[in-house]
C-alpha cells in the first residue's frame, strides 16, 4: 500500500513538472532568477575610414611664376608713314607672337634672307672650308651679294627656301625668282629669327657662330632696331637687315633683330624718293614703341 502511495505521489510530481516548467519558462516570472550580470555589449566593428578620409589630399600643382615681359613685347604701335609697313614681335621664351594687322602680307626679303642662307649651308656642311667661312662672314657682316649668290647656288636655290618653310614652320612665305626676291611675311621673318636663335636653322655646331656674325655686322648694317634699344642690349642683339631700291620706284627696307628674349621683324615698302633712312626710321619707331 505504501509503495502504491509513493508511486502515485511520484507520478503527480512528474506531471506537475511537465506542465509548470514550460509555463514558467515562457513567462516573465523567471526574469528575477536569471543572472543579474549585464550581458556583454554587442561588439561593433570599427567603421572603416571613408575613402575621402584615408586619401591624402593631392598636392596642389606648382604654379609657374609669371614671366616678366620681354624687353620688346606686345604694345600699341602707330606709325605715320607712306606706303606699306608691317611688324611682328616674338617672345623667345614662350613662342608667343603679336604684330600688325597685316603681319601675314608678304614682301621681298632682300638681304635679310642671307642669315638663313648661311645657317642652311652650315647645317648641311659640318666641316666647311676656311674659304667658305670667310665668304659667309662677308655675306653676313657686310652683306656681300656675290657671296649670297654663291651660297644660293650651293644650297640648291629655291630648295633652300623650301627647307626654310618646312624647318622653321613658316606659313606665308615662298621662293620667288632669286634669293633677294624671296617672299616673306613679318610673322614668318620673326619665326625665321627664332629658328636661327634656337639652333634649328644652323644646328648645334654652328648656331653660336652664326649669331656671333650677326652681332658683329658693320656699323652701316645696324640701322633700324639696334639704335632704338637700350645701350646695354645693343651688343647682345643679332641683326640682318635687308634693303633694295627696285626698278618699280620703291624702296624695300626690312629689319630683323634677335635679342636675348625676343625677335622683331619689320617690313617696309615706300616710294624711292623718300630714301633708305625713311624705312630705317620706321623700324626704329616700332622698336621704341614695343618697349613701352
Image (spheres, rainbow, N blue to C red):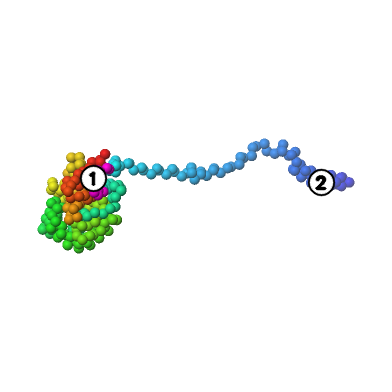
Corner quadrant of residue 46: top right
Nearer the observer, 64 or 278: 278
Residue 233: percent from the left, percent from the top? 20, 42
- Gap in Å between the C-alphas at discs 2 and 1? 131 Å
Q: Please tell me which residue is depicted at 34% across the width and 43% down the height of the picture.
A: 64
Q: Is residue 125 magenta?
A: no
**Which residue is labeled 1 in the image?**
81
Q: Is 22 drawn above or below residue 125 in the view shown?
A: above
- What is the magenta range? 77-86
Corner quadrant of residue 173: bottom left
Crowd band around label 1 with a 10 angstrom C-alpha radius: few (<14), some (14–19), many (20+): few
**Which residue is labeled 2 in the image?**
15
Q: Please tell me which residue is depicted at 44% across the width and 43% down the height of the picture.
A: 56
Q: Is 3 drawn above or below residue 121 in the view shown?
A: above
Q: Is residue 82 magenta?
A: yes
Q: Please tell me which residue is depicted at 26% across the width and 39% down the height of the picture.
A: 292
Crowd band around label 2 with a 10 angstrom C-alpha radius: few (<14), some (14–19), many (20+): few
Amino acid at each position: 500500500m505504501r509503495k502504491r502511495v509513493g508511486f502515485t505521489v511520484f507520478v503527480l510530481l512528474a506531471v506537475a513538472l511537465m506542465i509548470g516548467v514550460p509555463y514558467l519558462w515562457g513567462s516573465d516570472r523567471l526574469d528575477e532568477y536569471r543572472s543579474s550580470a549585464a550581458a556583454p555589449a554587442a561588439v561593433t566593428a570599427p567603421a572603416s575610414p571613408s575613402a575621402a578620409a584615408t586619401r591624402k589630399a593631392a598636392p596642389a600643382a606648382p604654379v609657374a611664376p609669371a614671366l616678366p615681359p620681354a624687353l620688346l613685347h606686345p604694345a600699341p604701335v602707330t606709325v605715320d608713314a607712306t606706303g606699306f609697313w608691317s611688324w611682328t614681335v616674338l617672345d623667345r621664351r614662350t613662342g608667343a607672337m603679336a604684330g600688325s594687322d597685316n603681319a601675314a602680307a608678304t614682301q621681298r626679303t632682300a638681304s635679310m634672307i642671307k642669315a638663313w642662307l648661311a645657317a642652311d649651308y652650315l647645317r648641311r656642311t659640318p666641316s666647311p672650308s676656311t674659304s667658305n667661312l670667310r665668304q659667309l662672314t662677308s655675306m653676313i657682316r657686310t652683306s656681300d651679294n656675290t657671296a649670297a649668290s654663291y651660297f644660293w647656288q650651293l644650297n640648291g636655290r629655291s630648295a633652300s627656301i623650301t627647307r626654310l618653310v618646312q624647318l622653321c614652320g613658316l606659313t606665308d612665305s615662298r621662293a620667288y625668282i632669286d634669293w633677294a626676291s624671296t617672299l616673306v611675311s613679318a610673322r614668318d621673318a620673326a619665326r625665321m629669327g627664332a629658328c636661327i636663335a634656337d639652333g634649328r636653322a644652323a644646328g648645334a655646331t654652328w648656331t653660336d657662330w652664326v649669331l656671333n656674325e650677326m652681332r658683329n655686322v658693320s656699323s652701316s648694317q645696324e640701322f633700324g632696331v639696334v639704335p632704338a634699344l637700350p645701350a646695354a642690349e645693343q651688343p647682345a642683339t643679332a641683326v640682318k637687315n635687308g634693303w633694295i631700291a627696285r626698278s618699280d620706284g620703291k624702296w624695300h627696307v626690312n629689319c630683323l633683330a634677335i635679342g636675348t628674349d625676343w625677335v622683331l621683324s619689320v617690313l617696309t615698302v615706300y616710294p624711292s624718293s623718300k630714301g633708305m633712312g625713311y624705312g630705317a626710321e620706321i623700324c626704329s619707331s616700332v622698336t621704341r614703341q614695343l618697349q613701352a
